[in-house]
Amino acid sequence: MQKTALITGITGQDGSYLAELLLAQGYRVVGMTRRTSTDVHERIQHLVEDIEIVSGDLLDQTSMTKVVQTVRPDEVYNLAAQSFVPTSWDQPVLTGEFTALGATRVLEAVRAVDPAIRFYQASSSEMFGKVTEVPQRETTSFYPRSPYGVAKVYGHWITVNYRESYDMYACSGILFNHESPRRGKEFVTRKITDGVARIKLGLAKELRLGNLDAKRDWGFAGDYVRAMWLMLQQGHPDDYVIATGRTHKVSDFVRIAFEAAGLGSYEPYVVVDPRFVRPAEVDLLIGDPSKAKRELGWEPEVSFEDLVAMMVAADIDRVAAAHR
Ligand code: NAP
Ligand code: F7E
């Protein structure tokens, strides 16, 4: 029997990789998008013949219930969110509506239509914030440092609560930063690789960044969507940290990206700009993925160095093509 998966946030970085993975597994893939006046879904352009699109919004309970009722999925992946941390200080209420209550709306829709539907919640290492333990694991307590992190803590606990209250197969994947050539250009990795490409091609002279000392556990998005799928294929629902177990400073990413482009030292090009420094920072993230390895058989395949090189090469090709 062919399985059906519903993906909220299919137009995002992870949604596009997850759709590819599920199509390869033989799923019927249905993506939920919100109505906009233009129809620019560049990350899933190559998939439009193979997936179905339904209209819905995390802010609207009626639309969420109708989507689940119409699609009748076996699995729901709730990836939609306001996911950019700095925006969460500018729009804290909206971030809470999308990223926190949005998860409840999807869970309510699943509960009302068919509580046997399996549910995945996109939780985040930002929940660990000002970390209380190194490395961070499933049992590490949360100390979020942004309205985004606070909203994700709510999304995490409401998922656990629906599992415990209604015996639903609801899982929370606590994913550490994961990147790719499809990452939004406002996130630091893609901002760096796009900036490097512009400098390399003579289109820019400098790259303005914020805190270069923050440390992140960066992996490849294509590896991380495999973990989401694995979580919904187990005998029982549970929560998992998904990470590489290695951490690097933002300045390490910058250095390797400039080297990968053959530009040498980054110092002549990089300007520290206080506009990109956050009101409260998450200084150090490093995850312990041993539970995921043990129970899901999951391990990342792309190394940090290969990830940086992949993103730099893709941005040089893209920027060059746009200016040909
Ligand atoms: P992303 O590229 O920012 O994509 C977010 C998606 O959410 C987009 O498809 C967006 O649609 C959709 N969305 C936003 N508000 C919505 C609403 N009100 N109704 C319906 N859809 C809405 O994020 P990502 O990097 O793929 O991340 C996927 C999920 O994992 C997010 O929940 C994120 O918070 C979480 N996460 C990400 C990371 C990471 O490192 N990437 C790590 C941990 C957790 P539009 O195209 O219409 O804007
Ligand atoms: O920042 C520093 C910044 O915006 C990483 C989201 O997917 O991962 C992501 O959240 C670090 C921070 O990602 C700039 O201060 C320096 O320490 O790429 P980012 P994030 O905030 O870690 C988590 C797991 C999620 O769940 C989120 O949805 O880089 N940094 N200079 C900068 N960051 C940005 N964006 N821009 C800079 O110029």
Image (spheres, rainbow, N blue to C red):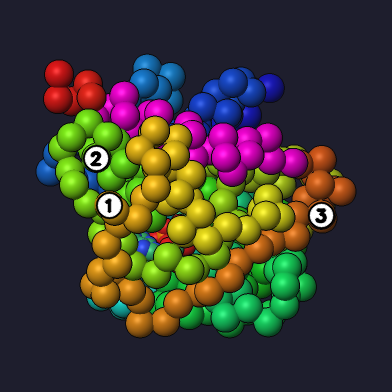
The residue that label 3 is drawn on is 290
Q: Residues within 10 Å of mark 1 (few under 14, many from 20)?
A: some
Instruction: Name the one closer to the observer, 22 or 69.
Output: 22
- In this rendering, position of residue 12 left or right of residue 302: left
Q: Which residues are magenta?
A: 299-319
Please state the horizontal and vertical placement of residue 133, each as a whole percent of the image. Answer: 72, 77
Can you tell which of label 3 and label 1 is closer to the viewer? 1
Of helix, strand and loop, which one carries label 2?
helix
The residue that label 2 is drawn on is 199
The residue that label 1 is drawn on is 269
Of helix, strand and loop, which one carries label 1?
loop
Who comes first in sequence, dot 3 or dot 1?
1
Of helix, strand and loop, which one carries label 3?
helix
Main SS, magenta residues:
helix
Quarter the N terminus occupies? top right
Task: Say which residue appears at 42% left-offset and 51% top-offset.
Answer: 254
User: Above or below — where is 287 with respect to 30?
Assistant: below
Q: Which mark is residue 280?
A: none
Task: Say which residue appears at 42% left-offset and 65% top-offset.
Answer: 212
| Residue 109 appears anywhere in the view | no
